[in-house]
Image (cartoon, rainbow, N blue to C red):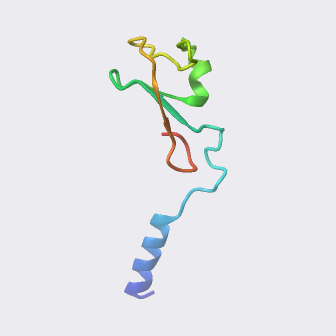
Amino acid sequence: MGLIDTVSAVLSASTNRAPDDAGDDGSAGAFWCDDCGVRVRDVDVDDEGLDRAAEGTPQCPDCGDPMRFERAAGSGCAC
């Protein structure tokens, strides 16, 4: 294998994506508290037992402020 083949193989391996079903648990993003830095994935809000504001937005477990939703940028997990 020549140098060009080796470089091509390395670059190809680094850009391979996970299969489409990897991390597909229905998550569309996560809720964030900008002041506290707390992050809770949208699919974990109920499991975490977070209180919700009147409009249904989860409240930060640390400070009680409504959290901001941020949509996931890719097809993988909402990390």
Note whether 9 is above or below 5 in the view shown. above
The front one of 54 and 27 is 54
Q: Position of residue 11 (x, y in %)?
A: 43, 72
Note whether 26 is above or below 49 in the view shown. below
Q: Position of residue 17 (x, y in %)?
A: 54, 60
View extreme (front): residue: 55
Note whether 75 is above or below 63 in the view shown. below
Note whether 22 is above or below 63 in the view shown. below
Q: Position of residue 49 (x, y in %)?
A: 58, 14
Q: Residue at x 57, y 22 (%)?
A: 45
Relative to residue 77, is residue 61 drawn left or right?
left
Q: Residue at x 49, y 68 (%)?
A: 13
View extreme (bottom): residue: 2
Relative to residue 38, is residue 49 drawn left or right?
right
The front one of 58 and 39 is 58
Q: Residue at x 45, y 86 (%)?
A: 1
- The tally of labels here is 0
Q: Quadrant of residue 28?
A: top right
